[in-house]
Image: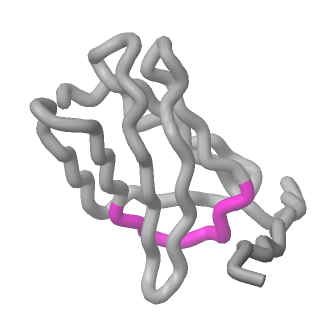
Amino acid sequence: NGGYSLKPVIRTIENAISGALIGKINQTNVIASVTASSGSNSYSTVTNLNGDFMLAGLPPGTYTVVITPPAPFNTVTINNIVITTGATTNIGTQNI
């Protein structure tokens, strides 16, 4: 009928077998996408208006994190971020 049919996906998070990633960007009132990738798996979120973000439910492993803000800000790539089971990894404040 020319319309769209969306299929929402809800991902459950098991804290006992996963870790989390938190951080911040140095700009407020800017919404940036944050993607953590390990192998063929990618997990994404966006920053809030304070610049904070959190990715929970990440399987343990080594990740590449890419923060992509709108222009004219700069994309930031952080390599070798280690996520461990039951722990929250803080990558601090990133300059965009």
The percent coordinates of residue 24 (x first, y second) are 41, 25
Quadrant assignment for the N terminus: bottom right
At a point 49% along the width and 31% down the height, the residue shown is 47
Quadrant assignment for the C terminus: top left
Query: Count of labels shown?
Result: 0
Left or right: 94 in relation to 45: left
Compare residues 72 and 78 and report the one nearer the observer. 72
The percent coordinates of residue 40 (x first, y second) are 47, 88
The residue furthest front is 1
Compare residues 80 and 9 and report the one nearer the observer. 9
Q: Specify the quadrant of the image occupied by residue 74.
A: top left
On whether residue 63 falls in the magenta region, the answer is yes
The percent coordinates of residue 94 (x first, y second) are 27, 29
The residue furthest bottom is 40
Stretch in magenta = 57-64
Q: Is residue 69 above or below residue 38?
A: above
Left or right: 37 in relation to 11: left
The percent coordinates of residue 86 (x first, y second) are 76, 51
At a point 45% along the width and 76% down the height, the residue shown is 38
